[in-house]
Image (cartoon, helix red, strand yellow):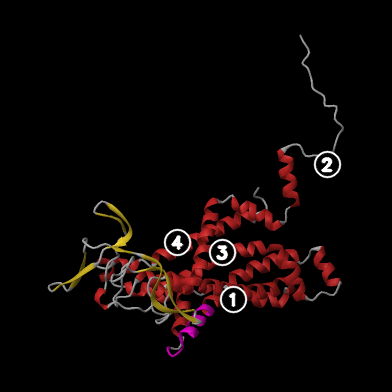
Amino acid sequence: MSQIPHFISTEPFDAEATTAAGSVVSERHAKASQARLIWWRFLRHKVAVVSLAFLAVSYAAILFVEFLAPYELNSRHTDFIFAPPQPVHLFHDGSFVGPFVYPLNYTLDMETLRRTYDEDRTQPLPIRFFCKSEPYSFWGLFSAETHLVCPPEGGTLFLLGTDRLGRDMLSRIVYGARISLTIGLVGVTLSFIIGITIGGLAGYFGGWVDATVQRVTEVLRSIPELPLWLALSAALPLTWSPLLVYFGITLILALLDWPGLARAVRSKLFALREEDFVAAAEMLGASPRRIIFRHLLPNFMSHLIASASLSIPTMILAETALSFLGLGLRPPITSWGVLLSEAQNIEAVALYPWLLLPMLPVVLVVLAFSFVGDGLRDAVDPYQH
């Protein structure tokens, strides 16, 4: 039997050399920070990445809603009440024209009193972009007239139809995003400040402080949330300004959301307060506030971020539900819940289904936050590789 030849390298051994691709990757992970490792694991969740991009675009858009909306928020078109969505066309009589709409002809059925609209297909009206149209006040700072999309000259552009006052639904949905999206962020911020503070004190000090916090959270969690929301929202004075109502609803949502977070923080601090670094900080004279917020909370901040991403859609849904029932935000404030409150009867569902379109961004945003929360939860899991 012939001997199998073996190859023996004569090169000197170099302990620092990394010849294998796996070794290079391992070294890159070994030198990376915890935040970078979480980000790399998050990028593996493709749906979460797409959802994060969608949320980033949505929140960036609320800064420029006046520019993005074709019409001003309360602009009324009394000749086009309950007008259906206008389709956008590209070709007219077989030739390419570009994005355009046909003008609408309005007729009233005297027997059913139903408004009907027909397209006049003899006259294409090109849609304008980056043009001047209805004036608006940009964040109340200065007046402007430039819009991203404008209706055609002498025509209309109701891409999502109009409501009972002839107001463009697309413009109102775009304006409503500013309220509905920010109320979740503001509410979660207040809830986290309350929950982290109370839960941190209970977990660090224990004893009667922990017992008091536990009893309060048990009482709050034992009360059904929806009746409590309704009761507190109904208690808001009708004479309050829209700004006060906004902050009042936000505060109500925050006050009812913190018990779950407080318990999570308490349990984590119970496990961490016996660690050596906490004892070292106490011996060096660090105050309880510094130990809690500087040394203990950063150890599970990634879990708190994941919890926040799952709490924001809950608050958005709560605001939408309260406004839909007429106990949340009220006109002239415009949110997705306020818009949906106009579609509470069977007439809207049967005759004007486009009044239900504000629920579409609610569904998309809630799903996006849920996917981002799932991705973050998997990314911060130390057992995920």
Q: Badge 1 local density, few (<14 within 10 Å), some, or many (20+)?
A: some
Q: Amino acid at mark 1?
A: Leu
Q: Is residue 320 visible?
A: no
- Measured in 3D between alpha carbons, the distance from the residue under mark 2 to the one under mark 1, in whole angstroms, is 50 Å
Badge 4 or badge 3: first in the primary sequence = 3
Badge 2 or badge 4: first in the primary sequence = 2
Q: Is residue 350 above or below residue 227?
A: above
Q: Amino acid at mark 3?
A: Ser
Q: Badge 2 local density, few (<14 within 10 Å), some, or many (20+)?
A: few
Badge 1 or badge 3: first in the primary sequence = 1
Q: Quadrant of residue 237?
A: bottom left
- Measured in 3D between alpha carbons, the distance from the residue under mark 2 to the one under mark 4, in whole angstroms, is 50 Å
Q: Position of residue 365 (x, y in %)?
A: 47, 63
Looking at the rendered structure, the secondary structure element under dot 3 is: helix
In which quadrant is the N terminus drawn? top right
Q: Badge 3 local density, few (<14 within 10 Å), some, or many (20+)?
A: many
Badge 2 or badge 1: first in the primary sequence = 2
Q: Quadrant of residue 162?
A: bottom left
Residue at the image position 60 percent from the left and 57 percent from the top: 377
Q: Main SS of the magenta segment?
A: helix
| Residue mark closest to the camera, 2 vs 3 | 2
Q: Position of residue 275 (x, y in %)?
A: 79, 63
Bounds of the magenta span? 238-251
Residue at the image position 71 percent from the left and 57 percent from the top: 34
Identify which residue, 355 or 71, lies in the foreground. Answer: 71
Looking at the rendered structure, the secondary structure element under dot 1 is: helix
Q: Amino acid at mark 2?
A: Glu
Looking at the rendered structure, the secondary structure element under dot 4 is: helix
- Measured in 3D between alpha carbons, the distance from the residue under mark 4 to the one under mark 3, in whole angstroms, is 14 Å
Looking at the rendered structure, the secondary structure element under dot 2 is: loop
Residue 309, labelled with which disc?
3
